[in-house]
Image: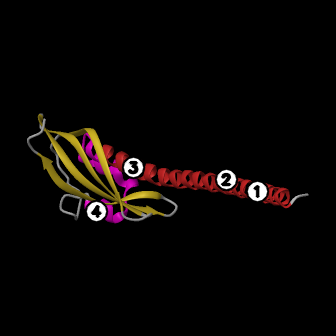
Amino acid sequence: MEPDQKKKYLLLTIGFIASIVIIMYVSSLRIQLQEVRANQRHYEEKIQSLSAIQNTDALKTNRAFLERFFTYHTTAERYQNIQSFMTDQGYKATHPSGTELPNSEQSVKSSMVGLKSFEYQESKTETEFFNEFKLSTEINDVTNTETVIVKTSLIYVKGQGWKINDVEYIGQLTGRE
């Protein structure tokens, strides 16, 4: 063999080996990338399912409480229907003066429609909702409808789930139909 042919043969061999090494390296990187993507999807699904469970449960509790608290035929019925959704502190927060239940002989009916809830999650066990809805209240056959905003604070009680720990009337919206 001539020296030029030896050089060509050596270069071809080195090029072939380098190509094989590069192909193996790229193949290895692709496999690792697929594994990382699979893990990432798995973890994203886990995070989403865990968040969805907690958020959905808190949102359901919030909605159920508001429906029972603002849709009633008598004040006694109102307070009886909400007790299971509340902590002791939350239940006391619903009393008008914060001390005892109102005892009125007046005919009072209330209903709410168009609930929009906006959540702010403070931690895994605490969340708050700002709730906007139309509230119709009928007292002695006179009806008044207004758009109100109510803040509810929920805590997660182990073994019982989400409970309303505080209720705060923020105000009413004016100038909207």
The nearer-to-camera label among 4 and 2 is: 2
Closer to the camera, 169 or 79? 169
**Circle number at residue 59:** 3
- Circle 4: element type: helix
Q: Earlier in the sequence, mark 2 or mark 3?
A: 2
Query: Who's the residue at 15% across and 43% down the image?
Result: 106
The nearer-to-camera label among 1 and 4 is: 1
The nearer-to-camera label among 2 and 3 is: 2
Would you say residue 157 sits in the magenta stretch? no
The nearer-to-camera label among 1 and 3 is: 1
Q: What is the C-alpha distance between the residues marked 1 and 3?
A: 64 Å
Contact check, label 1 and label 4, Cβ < 8 Å:
no
Query: Who's the residue at 24% across and 43% down the image?
Result: 74
Position of the C terminus, as image quadrant, is top left
Q: What is the C-alpha distance between the residues marked 1 and 4?
A: 81 Å
The nearer-to-camera label among 4 and 3 is: 3
Q: In this rendering, is residue 101 above or below 144?
A: below
Quarter residue 10 falls in: bottom right
How far across and how far down the image is residue 88, in percent?
Answer: 35, 64
Q: Which residue is mark 4?
A: 92
Contact check, label 1 and label 3, Cβ < 8 Å:
no
Closer to the camera, 112 or 32? 32
Q: What is the C-alpha distance between the residues marked 2 and 1?
A: 22 Å
Contact check, label 4 and label 3, Cβ < 8 Å:
no
Contact check, label 4 and label 2, Cβ < 8 Å:
no
- Circle 3: element type: helix
Residue 26 as seen in the image, left or right of residue 177: right
Q: Which residue is mark 2?
A: 30
**Amino acid type at mark 2:** Arg
Magenta range: 69-93
